[in-house]
Amino acid sequence: MSDDQVLIFDTTLRDGEQCPGASMTVAEKLRVAQALDALRVDVIEAGFPASSPGDFQAVEKIAATVKEATVCALSRAKPGDIEAAAAALSPARNRRIHTFISTSHLHMKHKLQMEPHAVLQAVADSVSHARNLCDDVEWSCEDGTRSDFDFLRRCFEAAIKAGARTVNIADTVGYTLPDEFYELVTRLRNTVPGMEKVRFSIHCHDDLGLATSNSLAAIRAGARQFECTVNGIGERAGNASLEEIVMAIYTRRDSLGVSTGVRTEGLTAISQLVSDITGFAVPPNKAVVGANAFAHESGIHQHGVLMNRGTYEIIDPETVGAGGSRLVMGKHSGRHALRARLDALGYVIGENKLQDIFARFKEIADEQKILDDEDIIALVETSEGAARARPILHNLQSEVSANGSARVRVEIARGSEISVASASAQSSFQAIADALAELLPGGQSLGAISIQNANGTNMPIVKASVSLHWPDGHRSIGQGASPDASVAFARGCLAAYTASRAPDKN
């Protein structure tokens, strides 16, 4: 492997799962591990086998399933931990034991209650023991960035002499600053004997919001492995985000001079997978994978993106599997964006009519904040000379039983015509989709659904993103919003249907 290749050590299944409330079942861990392997991360830290029978089982199953990545198991500097890690990893094609111990005075005194000489001996003994059981051993110093440098240097030297192939420094509490971390990594690489024979790794936490910055500073200083999690989940404020560092390296290779082997097109999908499994929603403004990462509301920005996407986007959305840019129609939007949205919805609007629609659009946006496709369609349909009537939700009634099954009655309006259908299903969403399928011909079926809460002007607003699959293989996506989740979902279905009926889809 060339010196400009940076390895990705993903610890979503170990450190990420330690985030309160983010624990996963064995089956869920296996799904994430398979997705990480498909993403082409280099190392998957599957768990801490000595911590529980469940973790042992998860590591063992992942070790037996993962095809390409190295499967890693964590252990303290204790023989029992190391042996449990080796046993759980036994089915793996490529395996690594990751053993660690604290090296800061604070941790040694109050947590380990060990003298420095005993810790130094434990470093040598644990790595040596692990190396007897596994060729690939990584050693880490917990709370390394708050450790005495001379002692830290001696620990690194002991780990390398004992057979560690990777040595890792952990900024366990997210304490260090990027310039400090750059200097620390540089000093260790230049002063520890044998460092040129091993891979230097870093593990950063986000307590001060600096995990990504610190990781990139360390890579500049010569680190060639970074430890991270999907969506940055983990203890307290979390870990360095896999997607942020990967895309920083991808986007700024001109400056960083390194690369990764990640299949970047899978970043959005794995972000959503981890979010769905853990129940931790991805913040809309999250870099790279957030819902707003490629969304634009400002009229100036929208006009720029319509002219040339590079004016306000440094990443092509398709590079991370995000599908495309999104122009959010709100009070900051301009005429160019409204024109583009109307074109996409299949309307041919003259300049005078556009001016009238735009004026009323601005009035509504001042109160409503965001207008979805259905709102824009309603604006056009209530204007004189509308090209054709589009389906709009007129009324929705829903009854949900204690076991979750639902019966709904849906009314849609096309101009002055009202159509009605009823349906029953195991969920209100499916019942609504079935009723709409009766009213809207085309053979479409319900695909993915994304529901999230947003702030409205006077009350909470639910936003629904709905995809429909069509017999010819194409997919259409629509968004709806309402204080009620079922209404938001129904509007999203109608918006997706409308998008599929645009001229270029026929």
Image (cartoon, rainbow, N blue to C red):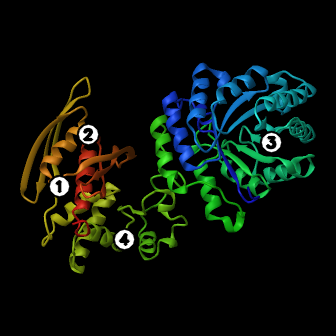
Give how far apart the Cα atoms at labels 1 and 3 are. Answer: 59 Å
Pinpoint residue 332: horizontal percent, then vertical percent: 39, 65
* Foreground tag (4 vs 3): 3
Horizontally, is 70 left or right of 276 in the view?
Answer: right
Residue 6 horizontal/vertical position (percent): 70, 54
Q: Earlier in the sequence, mark 4 or mark 3?
A: 3
Q: Which mark is residue 334?
A: 4
The label number, if any, that marks residue 165 in the structure image: 3
Could you classify mark 3 by the number of other residues whose Cα lies within 10 Å: few (under 14), some (14-19), or many (20 or more)? many
Residue at the spot of label 1: 442
- Judging from the image, what secondary structure is the residue with disc 2 in? helix
Task: Report the residue at 62% width, 20% height from top.
Answer: 52
Alpha carbon separation for disc pair 3 and 2: 52 Å
Of discs 3 and 2, which sits in the foreground? Answer: 3
Question: Mark 1 against mark 2, which lies toward the viewer?
Answer: 1
From the top left corner, tell me how far across and down residue 319 is, in percent: 51, 61
